[in-house]
Image (cartoon, coloured by chain):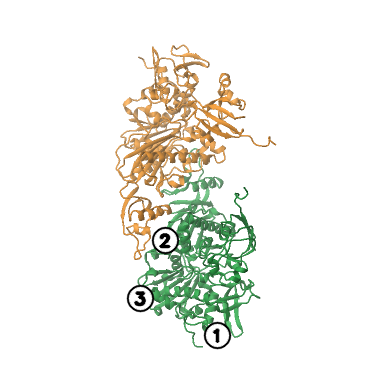
Chain colours: A green, B orange
Amino acid sequence: LGDIIQKTCRIDFEPIGKRVDVHPSVTLLEAAQQAGVMLNSSCGGAGRCGQCRLTVMQGKVSAPTEEEKAVLNQQALDAGERLACRVSAQDDIKVHVPAQSLLGRQRLQLNGDNGFLSIDPLVRTIPISVSPPSLEDTRSDLERLALSETTFTADPGVLTLIASLAREKGWVLDLYLRENEIIGAGPSGKAPLGVAVDLGTTKIAAALVDLTSGDELALAGAMNPQIAYGEDVISRLTYCQHHPRGAETLTTKVRQIIDQLMDDLVRQANTQREQIADLCIVGNTAMTHLLLGLPTRQLAVSPFVAATHLPMDIKARDLGLSAAPGAYVYVLPGVGGFVGADHVAMILASGLARTKGIALGVDIGTNTEIVLADPKTGTYTCASCASGPAFEGAHISDGMRASSGAIEWVSLTAEGVRLKTIDNAPAVGLCGSGMVDALAELVRCNALSTVGRLDKGSPFLRIGTSGPELLLAPGASSGSGRDVVLTQKDVSQIQLAKGAIRAGLESLLAATGTLAEDVTEVIVAGAFGSYLDIRNAFSIGLLPHLPYARYRQVGNAALVGAKRSLLSLAEREHALDIHKQSTHVELSTFPKFNRLFTLGMQFPLPKPV
Amino acid sequence: LGDIIQKTCRIDFEPIGKRVDVHPSVTLLEAAQQAGVMLNSSCGGAGRCGQCRLTVMQGKVSAPTEEEKAVLNQQALDAGERLACRVSAQDDIKVHVPAQSLLGRQRLQLNGDNGFLSIDPLVRTIPISVSPPSLEDTRSDLERLALSETTFTADPGVLTLIASLAREKGWVLDLYLRENEIIGAGPSGKAPLGVAVDLGTTKIAAALVDLTSGDELALAGAMNPQIAYGEDVISRLTYCQHHPRGAETLTTKVRQIIDQLMDDLVRQANTQREQIADLCIVGNTAMTHLLLGLPTRQLAVSPFVAATHLPMDIKARDLGLSAAPGAYVYVLPGVGGFVGADHVAMILASGLARTKGIALGVDIGTNTEIVLADPKTGTYTCASCASGPAFEGAHISDGMRASSGAIEWVSLTAEGVRLKTIDNAPAVGLCGSGMVDALAELVRCNALSTVGRLDKGSPFLRIGTSGPELLLAPGASSGSGRDVVLTQKDVSQIQLAKGAIRAGLESLLAATGTLAEDVTEVIVAGAFGSYLDIRNAFSIGLLPHLPYARYRQVGNAALVGAKRSLLSLAEREHALDIHKQSTHVELSTFPKFNRLFTLGMQFPLPKPV
């Protein structure tokens, strides 16, 4: 009889100290999700990316699969290293999750180039002071408060708030008005607040602003919890196709984290949720579709058609976001394909609309969006390319995101390798800007060929188990106790990413018949783009080698665009203009793309000293 | 240890055959609610109305309370009769629920005077036939479908429906458009449908209409399940004040029953919920507040202030009503106090706005609403009076609603009492129109004095346990096996109700300085009002004795008004005009009301033969 009883295994995740009981059929990746342990998983649990690596310390687990043998060498397997997505427990076990596999609290890019803005928000404050009801004046609450001849409306929730607030405050209060709808109310003289959110594939940033003064009151950030279901948009959409209620899960996850960020913002600013009278959220097409619960089936397959690229207004409560009872979320319009609201927000905030000559804008991420703005025609030509998460640390032996211990700057000197890590912590791995620096240094030192081969004769390299490699930090001084290296395979991964981005830029120039030298300004947006050494980006051929002064790094312009849309109705109209004036170039069918990709993969010859 | 375990008692409700297990602290009224047995309860469970009477057949129950002793005589108590709201089980018990205590399927008034209407609904059908997406044309679904330059919006749920429907139907389909919002979609050529609901305190009526042709496709009706929580609006609002989550319960109950009525409508018309593109609901102020989840605390106490009397547009899904994914519910504006959307709908539908002279409108119910329309000034003066549920059967010994076995017509002849019952079933009790007839006959036969005393010397009366009474049906032939009688106490109850209604009418005339004889038309709306014998209403002084031709009985004009608002945008604008042109007279503070009430209570002298 004992055999019939389904056994559960207890999994202890160390050093996080989380524990969960699961059935033996459950993978450790799924067990980690249940336990609230956020593991990297760029391939969505397919056993390919090697990001969910962990070490089994104690207890019996399933035998290594073919996928694990392809990613982990025998030495690693002998040491108990496994892929969480492929292994399951057969007993109570204890596993160690290395820092690289764990999505911790990471460095988040929150600011951007703000620029001048006249404050004219969609939601306005109407101060009210009226006589209370009496037997002689039994007008309804709404008619009592709405002073003009216009017919105002309000949600039941708003009327409930008003009924108690008005009576508590002796009929002296502020109404929050959005067009002819009262969406909230607050004590007299308290400004309504707005929340701007940049919903990235990897990172989420949120800001709390005063809708009257335009002041930023608080900032908060978090990793996108959808990462556990796939690191790029296509993996996530694929997850949704293959799992019943998968889209619902991803939608719920992202709504919950935004609601948590709002908690953080409200706590920092010592205010209440009811004061939040407006929200503005931006993200790429897949992110906004998942947030809003829009259909994604047709977005997951060619020709990648969105349900809508038009702006959306939806009640915050419909997204499970607690704010003023009638508050809306405004999602900016997108352009086409995966080029979404975040890109329009970036154009809005970066000043691309105000340049005198032709300008390029590039927002490097797991999905990279590029725009060419032509002030003569007033048009924007946009494209996106799946540059992949290499610069975020995925598919790189010791790759990691920009968090504590990440090597963010590298220099090769006669005395050896010089490094700078985030927080000056012992080196754990290499983040995007460090990768660009490392490769640029290898090019400079003639250790990397035009086609991307490491020179095994170079004095800067050593020969590792899989060929030449750059030792960045020896195990003795590293944060992980293991050597931190950059291998030939890593170089090839970075080469693919930078090739895709460069090919995207060149394709857009070709598609619009623009010569690179005619571009008067290049705006580099986003977190990675802000920490990027532009000159090193020239050295590895990631960005076109134009005069350095033409480049401008603007930080998280998407969040700034969202903030501007909160503060100014004119900016929302401007966003709609950008949407209307934009065309989307589908790079996967652009004839010259493959040739430009091959060219983009090349590393330039080192500059003569 | 056995004593510690909380005991539950099983209650069997006969002859309905429902069963529930409850703790001994729970009253049988609450147990019945849990079991889905709908008991009358006009006082909201206060032990006063005697409507929830039942007989304990088997098992031990709590001792009779003082309230029960006041309502039930010793003989009844000895026979096991109890008030469900006061008694609780102490063991497994079996109870018998008499037909009078049970809210069964009742006769419902569904139609009214429709009048001419040009069909111009707010929701329109837009036939669509577009080319499918391709790599050369990757416009989003919404932009593909929205052909003009205007920016259209749509809910996520609508976009999900469209994404699958468009692909299934080869991009040939109909969109349901409401202003610039796409609220639904259907296969090409299928007309969108609308649902009109008259949400009465006692009865709910619903109609399904074709929004293109205006045809009525189905009708359905149900009792308002809130009756179990109190028979009139004040008892229900009081219930909400005294029970945590009480308002929520009443809101849920009424939303569920409307959703069930929609099931019924859709089944009758053999169509789908997705075709329902618009809804229009009317009800008195308390009913619409509870439906919408508006605050009711301030409405429950003097000066009885509504949260809003303005029209409300709210998504059907926010009310838990399944329809086209983006469909709205439109609630018509109200006037003031408890004079709500149903009264505006009645004015809309009854033709009161088109009369040449001064017109009166009266909608008799548990709450009676009255309007005086003055075509010279284009104004409406409205009032409501708590006439009580006597005409619905409450507080009357053998009173009942207009359902099978109810005496609806009475005549006193030399040969004795002549009756007509609904469905010609054996008499069970007396409904409103029967009460009016009985009293009119008693007046005619000199058996009822001006002040409302039954003449114990009258040959038509017998002496019962509590004085003179009219025997309508002896137990030998009645449906209940008991004598069906009309007692002196019953006469007094009816007198109070008719006095309140007449005083309301006279107060409105006085408040507007109108002489009764100057009223050119009197419109009597509602179910009771339609079955009422107007001449008998004169005889008992319920209605002013004007030339009979000036009276018009229009049936359920509130439902017709709701239907008209579904079919015509102009009617919604007209409703808003009526709202703006209306003033509300609060009768509880009207100085002459008390004197007019005293006069209204009098029975006129019998007309000379």
Quadrant (top left/top right/bottom left/bottom right) for the C terminus of chain B: top left
Judging by the rendered image, the residue that carries numbered circle 2 is A299
Disc 2 residue crowd, few under 14, some 14–19, many 20+, Cα 10 Å: many
Query: Which sits earlier in the primary sequence, circle 2 or circle 1?
Result: 2
Residue A477 drawn at (x, y percent): 65, 75
Element under disc 1: loop
Element under disc 3: loop
Q: In the image, are marks 2 and 1 on the same chain?
A: yes
User: With A318 as the anchor, is B86 left or right in this view?
Assistant: right
Residue A572 drawn at (x, y percent): 43, 61
Judging by the rendered image, the residue that carries numbered circle 1 is A457
Q: Quick one: A481 or A321, which is closer to the camera?
A: A481
Element under disc 2: helix
Query: Which sits earlier in the primary sequence, circle 2 or circle 3?
Result: 2
What is the spatial separation of the Cα atoms under label 3 and label 1, in whole angstroms? 43 Å
Q: Mark 3 lies on which chain?
A: A
Q: Do the residues labelled 2 and 1 touch (CB within 8 Å)?
A: no
- Give the label on residue A513, or none: 3
Task: Give the amino acid type for the residue marked by disc 1 in the picture.
Answer: Gly
Task: Give the amino acid type for the residue marked by disc 3 in the picture.
Answer: Gly
What is the spatial separation of the Cα atoms under label 2 and label 1, in whole angstroms? 48 Å
Query: Which sits earlier in the primary sequence, circle 3 or circle 1?
Result: 1
Q: Quick one: B356 or B74, which is closer to the camera?
A: B74
User: With B493 as the anchor, is B549 left or right in this view?
Assistant: left
